[in-house]
Image (cartoon, grey):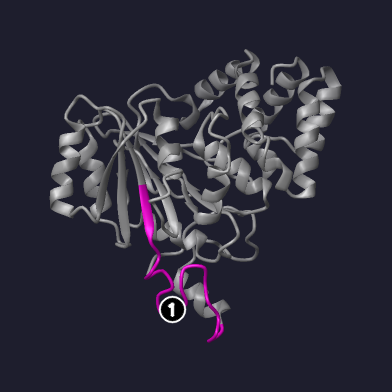
Amino acid sequence: MQKRLKSVAVQGVANRSPFQSVQDAATETAGPQDSFAFGNSIKDPTANVTVAILMCTANGAAHLPDQMDSIARQSHTNWVIYASDDGSTDGTLDMLKRYQKTMGEERLVILKGPKRGPVANLMSLIRNKTINADLYAVCGQSDVWYDDKLTRSIGGLIFCHPKEPGLYCSRSHLVDAEGKSLGKSPLITKAPCFGNALVQRLGNPHTLVFNDAARKLLTAVPKSAPIVAVDWLAYLLVTGHEGRVAYDAEPSLDLRLLEPDDENHVGLKHTLKRARSAMSGSMKERNDHNLEALKQARKRFSAVNSERLAWFEEARGKSSWHSVRLLRKANAHRQSVVGSFVYLLAGGIRKI
């Protein structure tokens, strides 16, 4: 039984941490005839939860064994890995085939990627109709999952209604190429919501786990739509539809940073870099892409979030205090006070 974890408030959950023991929660809230999204066993409501692990690989042989071995150690064992290789030339594919011989073809399915970059590769897995599960866990090729990663993500999503879109993500423990600790990713302290999703991602994509209802929202996005980041798009879609977002304040993996990544670092230096990036107008193109990807989905957003999205779009065409006023009406905010202030300034000079 997993321990109760520290967590912040989550959208769609009231008066209960989504990471309390699943078995305890079931005992507290369920009657003898109650059923859950993933089964109806009160003794262990997670026993039959199937998880499709969506792994994208591209020349990752150097650290792939660490990732594969950490998956094999998961406390939740009802999973299948779908590895989409995007044309590796460093032995990654041969390494996957060796693991496949050990694990079995029913546990590790190897696919060919579209060779159009990591976002297209991941979307090819999400859109693959032969892949079906209760939950879908995004997986990097260089990280190390903690043994209870899948168990904890199931704990955050077990009470979703089958038709309710839900996603889980967590904080990350950052390490360098050699595995040396670099600290933790920024802590999310404000409740996940659509207003926050408008202006920033919630966590690292390698921690993302989502249910089938959320997957349907992602697959409905036109293939021609530009996607900045799958995790960001999922955050926008799930919160826009008033779905459930479970954020785990404790790291669920060691995230290996093989190149500079200011988004995942904490500290004044990295905060200033993000501020300069926002003021330079880099956010404007990302917002263009996000809004394009939401064109169809927004028709089914809640009335409140549809209105907020309209205010956000209007704010992008205004300057000075007009933009600030509209951004505040849209509840557009980042997780930090400094980040929100910088974003309002960027909006005032039409840089968003």
Q: Is residue 239 magenta?
A: no
The x and y percentages for residue 35 are: 53, 77
Name the dominant secondary structure of the magenta segment. Answer: loop
Quadrant into which the C terminus falls: top right
The x and y percentages for residue 62 are: 20, 30
The x and y percentages for residue 144 are: 29, 43
The x and y percentages for residue 277 are: 58, 17
x 31%, y 30%: residue? 86
Vertical position of residue 168 compared to residue 349: above or below: below
User: In terms of image quadrants, where is residue 282?
Assistant: top right
Quadrant into which the N terminus falls: bottom left
x 78%, y 39%: residue? 308
The residue wearing badge 1 is 41
Q: Please indicate, yes or no, whether residue 36 appears anywhere in the rendered image.
A: yes
Task: Pick the residue in front: 25 or 308.
Answer: 308
Vertical position of residue 351 compared to residue 198: above or below: above
Stretch of the chain drawn in magenta: 31-53
Badge 1 marks a residue whose secondary structure is: loop
Say what amino acid the circle numbered 1 marks.
Ser
- Graded by Cα atoms within 10 Å as few (under 14), some (14 to 19) or many (20 or more), the crowding at tag 1 reads some
Q: Looking at the image, which residue sits at the far bottom?
A: 32
User: In terms of image quadrants, where is residue 182?
Assistant: top left
Q: Looking at the image, which residue sits at the far front?
A: 129
x 56%, y 36%: residue? 201
Question: Going by the image, does 66 lie left or right of 316?
Answer: left
Vertical position of residue 42 compared to residue 327: above or below: below
Q: Is residue 42 magenta?
A: yes
Q: Please indicate, yes or no, whether residue 247 appears anywhere in the rendered image.
A: no
